[in-house]
Every structure is written in C-alpha cells, then in structure tokens.
Amino acid sequence: MKKMMIALIGIALAVTACERVPLTGRKQLILVPNNEMLSMSFTQYKQFLDTSKVVSSNSGDAEMVSRVGGRIRQAVEAYMNSNGLSKRLEGFKWEYHLVQSPQVNAWCMPGGKIVVYSGILPYTQNEAGLATVLGHEVSHAVAEHGNERMSESLVANRLLQVGQVATGISTASRSPQTQAIFQQAFGIVGPLAYQYGVGLPHSRRQESEADHLGLIFMAMAGYDPHEAITFWTRMAKASGGKAPAEFMSDHPSDARRIADLEKLMPEAMKYYKR
C-alpha cells in the first residue's frame, strides 16, 4: 500500500507540476500557485522592513544597491523576454533596500523583493562584487527555488504521513514498546536520510544553478563576470577554512564554487557588454 501510494503521488506530480529552470533547463517540481507565493512574499517583506533598520535611500551605499539592482533587473527582463519566458516574471514588483546589519548576507524573495545587509559590503567592495551577489540572489527568485523547496517539503511531509500510516498498520499487533521503536526508527532515519541524501545535495544544486544564472545576468548587466571569481575568492579567505564539510552544507564549497565559475566563464563572456 505504501509503495502504491508513493507511486501514485509521484506520477500525479510528474504529470501536473513539472517545469524547467530558465537557462539550465533542469526539471523542477512547482506546486504552490504563483499568486500565493507572491502574496506571502510581499507580506513578509513589508513586515521585515517595518522591523529593520532600513538605510536611507539617499545614502551612497543605498543608491548603489538600487543602481546595481536596477541593472540586474533589466538584464533579467531582457533575457526572459527574448527567450519567451516573461511569464516567470508576472506579478514581480521589484524593490531594493539596504538594511543596517552586521550579517554578511543578501536575499531576494519571490517577486523581486531584495534586501542587502550592510555587513556584506566590505566583501563586495565594488559594484561588480555587489552585482555578483544580487545576480545570484535574483536568480533564486527567477528560478523559483523557494517554491520548489516548499513543494518538495509538502511532498516529503505527505510521504512521511503515508509511511506512518503504513508502519502503524504493519505493527498494530505488536507491543507498544515495539511500535515506539518502529516509529522512532522511521522518524530519525527517514528525515536524516532525506536531509543528507536528497535535501542538502539538492540545495547545493540550486546554489550552483543560481551561480550560473547570476553570472549570465551580471554579464548582461555590463559587469565583468570575472569579478564573481574575485568576490568568492575573498569570501573563501574570509571564512578561514571554517566552513563545514560540503556534504553537511546547503552550499557548495568555496573551491567547487570557484572552479564551476571558471568553467562557466566562456559562456558568460558571450553575454558581457562593457
């Protein structure tokens, strides 16, 4: 019964919910309607800004974030329109804000809602470095990685419920202690196996995919894609080798990331316009 239900769910999802990521062509699972994703994004973005120290748009750094973000946006829209993918940008309401925070981070919610933390600016150092970061983060939104992760979580939770039902049936005649052992084994082994065997590797794949798209977008925006390697080299030195082993991380290692960018450089240079 468990195998049959898993198979039926898999077939239904494969038929109804598969899309392809722009540029890479990778198939992905998309279950959450776009309007729901955008609604959640816009609400969360506003709440975040209302409770954060947003840097004045008149400051030089905030102006730079807006300027670089605008150029990345134009590149994204140009690429999507020329490749018949403009539907992916329906409902986008682009915003760029610099937030005062020591965090070395930036992100882009669905719909083009961008935040850059001031803590990352010493590492970006210039507009091209910032374009590397924003190109990467915007690519997550364009590739709908957030929706994909939510969709996979929904499926994983559903399969977990199916597994629990099947386990309950198969152990119904056993003692409560035996049932507890079975449930514990399923609860621990299942999620961990998914995390290290599927979840983290897939997250790393999404990060590498965002690097790929971001490199193309920053090149189209007029930023030398070689600056992406320079930026990640700085980040690698800053980490001081303290990053976790790659198989335990949701990001590729710095060395792998830099090597992959070097391989992608000939492709990116075809899009580069000074």
Image (cartoon, rainbow, N blue to C red):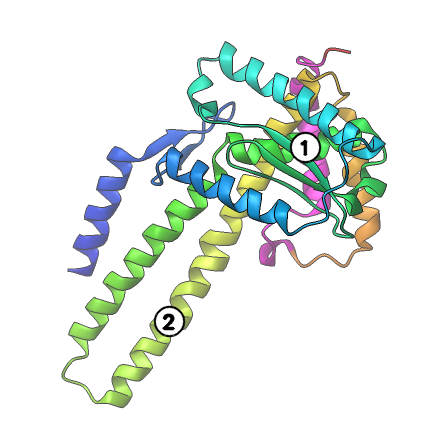
Spatial CA span between label 1 and label 2: 38 Å
Q: Is residue 260 magenta?
A: yes
Give the labeled residue for mark 1.
Answer: 134
Counting residues from the start of the chain, the first of labels 1 and 2 encountered is: 1
- Up the image or down, 47 lies above or below 61; here it is below
Is 76 in front, or is 206? 76
Residue 266 shows in this picture: no
Is 48 in front, or is 124? 48
Is 9 in front, or is 148? 148
Q: Name the main secondary structure of what is drawn in magenta.
A: helix
Residue at image position (77%, 37%) is 56
Query: Image check: 72 left or right of 12?
Result: right
Dot 1 lies on which element? Answer: helix
Give the labeled residue for mark 2.
Answer: 187
Residue 153 shows in this picture: yes
Residue at image position (75%, 48%) is 104
- Residue 151 location in percent, x, y? 38, 45
In terms of image quadrants, where is residue 204? top right
Q: Which residues are magenta?
A: 246-272
- Residue 250 location in percent, x, y? 58, 51
Q: What residue type is disc 2 on?
A: Gly
Q: Is residue 213 magenta?
A: no
Query: Image check: 239 left or right of 33?
Result: right
